[in-house]
Each structure stands twice: as structure tokens, then as C-alpha cells.
Amino acid sequence: MTRHGEMITTAGHACRVPIFAPVRRVGRGLVRQRVESAWGHATITGHLGQRERDALDSVCEAAQAWRPESTGDVTALVDSARLRASLGWDRWKYSQIRDALRALRAAEIELIIHGERSEWSGIITHIVEAGDPPPERVGSRSRWRTAPPVPEPGRTSPRDGMMWEITISRAWIALMRRLQVRYPAAVFHMRYGVSQAAARFILSHKPGATMRIDTVLDAVGVQSRDRARARRELAADASLMATAGVHIDWAAGVMTTHPAPETTRPAPETTRPAPENTRPAPEPLAL
């Protein structure tokens, strides 16, 4: 399972414009909504929650290689076992990861930030699987306490996973390059979506930032009628939020960010040099 101290690189604007609902499970069907923010506005058709956000950010973290496409999109080569380990073996099945990736591909988003128009059809535009589907391993904590096996050179189907080619749209890549932020992987392990959305929002600001709790809840899209429930869920996740660097002072009614850890992983690049004294990553698969 991912260590809570590891840092995940993501698009800062998406932390501040609530494209992803502050819940872990979203309803079925298509919903069209317009979300206003000081950073711009987004028109979203589809259903995206914090589980989809977890999957997207984990793809960027777990990618072993990146390949730019002629369209401006970028394709990530991902070992499915490594991706599931990042999200948590005891919390995700492979079928749930596929569902999240398909939701990211199906959603249509028009995002306008600072007056600049950017249209995309899906955050993920293409998914290719190579190799036989890996067996489900529900409750496999004991076997997967350590990192999943690294594929041998030339293998396209690791012993305990398969290789995925996941193409991320140029619009999302542009957002990551415009305002890039990092947050601890402890956010993946929070129980409630509102806790994840609130943590991502406030951690996208400078260390030491302090905001009213209601200000944060309003920013991530929590309706007034849901505030009491949201506060109970924040309280249930308070210890993990503190681990992630977000402290809640209930007496003052504020959230404060702690300084980010000094040790972080480098942000994902479209080309990544092979580390010394390690096995080379598999060659990119043909689309």
C-alpha cells in the first residue's frame, strides 16, 4: 500500500474548481452542471467524484513511462498492479479501477479559467489493456505489504498484473503545467469524499493558509443542507487529515495547512530517464 508520506502531483486548478464532487460514490446517469469559482467556471456533463480523482492522480503517480501523442495528448504506461498498490489493495478491486477510468473517459468538461477557453471530451481519451486480466485479490494485505513485482524486461504482462496504456487529454496536461501542486497520499485513504475534497482544496494553497470551515465546504461544492453531515465526516477523518497536513480547529471553526514535507517525488514528465542500476521499463505498446 502507498505510504502516507509519499506526495502525489496534480493539477491545482482542479483542486479549486469543484469538477469532482465531494463524495466518493456518485449516482448513475448524466448530469449537467455549471460550477462558478473565483478561478473561472466549469460546465460538467457526467458524474465524477473523489474516487475518479483518486484514480486519475494515481495514474500520473504510478506511470512507468510517458509518450507524447501527435494530438497533444500524453499516454502513460502503467503496471496495473502498481496502480492498485498506490490506491490501496484493501480498498480497490481491478473492476473498480476500470469503472473509474471509464467514467473519466465518458465525462465531457468545458473549463474556463481566467477567461481562457479549453474544451475536452473526457479527461482520459483512450485506454488499452495488454495481457490477461489479473486475479482479484480482496483483502490481500499480508501478501502486498511490500511493493508489487516489477515487470521483467520484454514482458507486457507482469505475473500479478497487466500493462495499461492510458491516454490523458492535452487539456488536463495543460492544467497540470499551469498550476502544479502536491498532496500526501494519505488523502487516498480518507473515508469520506468531503474530507478528500477539502484536503485537496486547502493543500493547493501555500503552507500556513487558514480558512473558515464553511468557506472550504462552499468552495468544494457542499450544499447548505449537507453542512451538518459534512462536518461529521470531517471529524471522522480528522486524524488522517492531520497526517496529510490539514489541521481542524473546531473551536475557531478553521482549517490550517501544515508545511509540506521536504522529501517529495519529482513531478511526472512526458519523458523520464531510466534510473541507474535498475531494470529498464517495458517498451511502449503499439496503439
Image: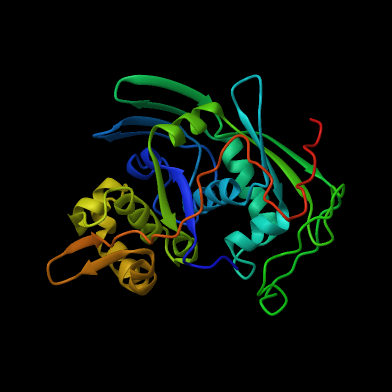
Residue 169: percent from the left, percent from the top? 57, 30
Looking at the image, is 18 positioned above or below residue 175? below
Query: Residue 265 vs residue 135: left or right?
Result: left
Give me the residue at 51% from left, 53% from top. 265
At 76% from the left and 59% from the top, the residue drawn is 150
- Please identify the quarter of the rendering in which residue 225 is found: bottom left
Residue visible at 33% across and 48% down in the picture: 204
Kindly indicate the quadrant of the structure image that contains residue 212.
bottom left
Which residue is outermost to the bottom?
142
Q: In which quadrant of the rendered image does the C terminus lie?
A: top right
Report x, y in % for residue 90. 62, 71
User: Is residue 4 placed above or below 121 in the rendered structure?
Assistant: below
Name the one closer to the observer, 175 or 19: 175
Q: Left or right of 61: which side holds 22?
A: left
Q: Position of residue 236 (x, y in %)?
A: 36, 73
* Residue 19 horizontal side relative to residue 138, left or right: left
Q: According to the image, what is the colour scheme of the structure?
A: rainbow
Q: Position of residue 148 (x, y in %)?
A: 72, 64
**In the image, residue 266 above or below residue 106:** below
Q: Total label count?
A: 0
Please determine whether, in this image, residue 221 is positioned above or below residue 34.
Answer: below
Q: Quadrant of the N terminus?
A: bottom right
Q: Residue furthest left?
A: 252
- Front residue of 136 and 23: 136
Residue at 77% over, 48% down: 280
